[in-house]
Amino acid sequence: MKKRYLSLLLIFVITLRLSAQQEWIVPAENLSKLSTFAFSDSTRKAGMNLYITNCKSCHGDPGKNNVIKLVPPPVDPASDRMQANTDGGMYFKISQGRMPMPTFKNILSPTDVWVVISYLRSFNPKYAQEVAPKVLTGAMVQNVKIHLNWLKEKDQVQAVVSGTKDKIEQPVAGAEVKLFAKRYFGNLLIDEARNTDAQGQVLFNFPKDLPGDSTGYVQLLARLSDEEAYGESKSETTLQIGVPTYKPPLNEQRAMWNVVQKTPIWLLLSYTFTVLAVWAFIFYVLFQIRAISKSGLSKDQDTID
Amino acid sequence: MSNNTDPINENEAQGNENTRRAFFKKFGLIGAVAATGGAAIYSGYRYEESKPDRDLVKVLTADNRLVEVPRDQVKDVKVDLTRLQKLGREGLKGHRWVMVIDLAKCRNARQCVAACQNAHHLRPYEYHINTLVMQESKSTAPYYMPKTCQHCDNPPCVAVCPVDATFKRQDGIVLIDNERCIGCRFCIAACPYSARMFHWEEPLMAEEDKGKVYNIELNVPQRKGTISKCLFSSDRLREGKLPYCVSACPNGVYYFGDENQDAVTNGTTKETHRLSELLRVNGGYHLMPELGTKPRVYYLPPKNRLFEFVDPREQNKNQEKV
């Protein structure tokens, strides 16, 4: 009896937990977040491309309800349940994620996330977008440019940030800049996030031992953290500041495990020598037999004569 | 003498007569063939001319554009086995892949195992990754340890293969070619990490995969009587993506990257770290370094764990009770 009650209780608890998992609560301050730009056909198209590479493998084709089986299951973007989210809610969920949905804040930039949301909203005919009022902290700086220099004597990378304000180009002060080195699967943060000074300049300590390509080139990426204020601003530069790295292919050395052409020398020599020795012995025996039979013949002839 | 010469003359005359006749015969025949052929070509040309605009079919290109192509210009792209084998043997130039497994974070979510089995068409009890429960002694804390193929730089499994079916590529990955494998299982015996499995039975998706071109970098279709093992998802690496298991992990256990760039990227957070620093700060180590196999997989010790260890055997018992 006791066991039965216990198992009933367990089932109850499990169902409770499952239903709790279905709810995904967004903190209140994130719910009202809005995009800084208006959604358009071009953002929807860019969003579709981002959706195909990042989301489709789990969320399927919007409206077709072909999501993959996971617990909790992914929601079809065209469904009412997905569309019931506020823009801010969607932004929070995409950037933070929760098990099993991965966090996208290191994969997609804030602008990218909004672009994806613009695509998701295209499946909701009732949706009317509300755009965030322009933030004043950026003080209406437009066309932000980041220029990267290498200061050799100090082992530092200098970033100079400028933008146009009131149609005059001037430095952007007090903006947080992050410097990355491009790697195969992602961007490696160099030093730490730093703020620009009054001249719009910021210095990053560059590690002396970071590998570059075979000639020492490293692809750098600089980005302003506050995209809401400055728009999407990043700059890519390739500088010859890394350690020239050439490591030979791992299957180049002679080894027991490698292909026939890469046999170890000692094996090649000892094997060849052994084979030759065996053949030499066989031929030696054959020649001896021949010599014996020859000498026998000549003796026979002697006796006949 | 004259008796002798006459037949020759006759023969000559006859011969001449024959060649002329034969010549006219041949001439007539060739003429007829040429006329018929010409007519056929001409009528074909007329037919082509009289056809309305050629049939167009809509084709979606790789970069997602919809284009129209005449139907007769559409050719099926055949995936070429020889080409796939060649690419698979060569590997990616200028890279040395490494994996780092952080034991402090593994909670036995088993998403890596599921993603791997899904990609390589394996049954739930066929593993390229094993998640082991480890406990050094009775008084020490147990922990989970995902174990893949270690992709050794001095691989004992490759050394014993009698048919060159398993091999090491320039980027460090040890692969298995099922087209060559004879199923002798020497490599299973040689591997100190028990990383290899054998298809004793017909593979899971044998029916569905029938007729598919064998992809050596995915080991699909799997084949009965051959070896299968972790491939570091070489097909994904070629596309610049993280391996299946790495990107499926919800707990940030796996890091994957390129030793040449001294960088590894976490599959869950997608944050990139310096490999050397990660290993130095956390005390990274190899499995069984005393064997001299030089693995390409590093482990970070299970310290500072923020969750309770649940013995999977206990879990299974509870589930059975319910």
Image (tube, coloured by chain):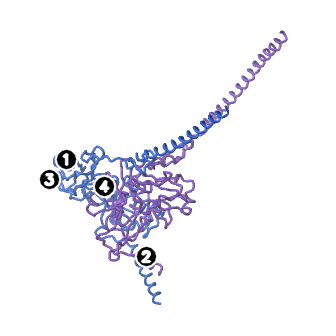
Chain colours: A blue, B purple
In this image, B173 relative to A180: left or right? right
Q: Secondary structure at mark 2?
A: helix
Residue type, mark 3 in image: Ala
Q: Rate crowding at label 4 as few (under 14), some (14 to 19) or many (20 or more) other CA atoms within 10 Å.
A: many
Name the residue at the top extreme.
Answer: B2
For marks 2 and 1, give the CA distance. Answer: 67 Å
Of mark 3 and mark 1, the one earlier in the sequence is 1
Q: Are marks 1 and 4 in contact (CB under 8 Å)?
A: no
Which callout, 2 or 3, points to the residue nearer the camera? 2
Q: Secondary structure at mark 3?
A: loop
For marks 2 and 4, give the CA distance. Answer: 37 Å
Q: Quadrant of the C terminus of chain A?
A: top right
Q: Secondary structure at mark 4?
A: strand
Do pointers 2 and 3 mark residues of a single chain?
A: no
Residue type, mark 2 in image: Arg
Q: Secondary structure at mark 1?
A: strand
Q: Are marks 2 and 4 in contact (CB under 8 Å)?
A: no
Q: Which residue is mark 4?
A: B263
* Pointer 1 chain: A
In this image, A274 relative to B105: left or right? right
| Nearer the observer, B77 or B37 | B77
Q: Which residue is mark 1?
A: A169
Q: Which residue is mark 3?
A: A198
| Nearer the observer, A33 or A210 | A210
Of mark 2 and mark 4, the one earlier in the sequence is 4
- Which label belongs to residue B313? 2
* Pointer 3 chain: A
Which callout, 3 or 1, points to the residue nearer the camera? 3
Residue type, mark 4 in image: Ala
Q: Are marks 2 and 1 in contact (CB under 8 Å)?
A: no
Quarter of the figure with residue B308: bottom left
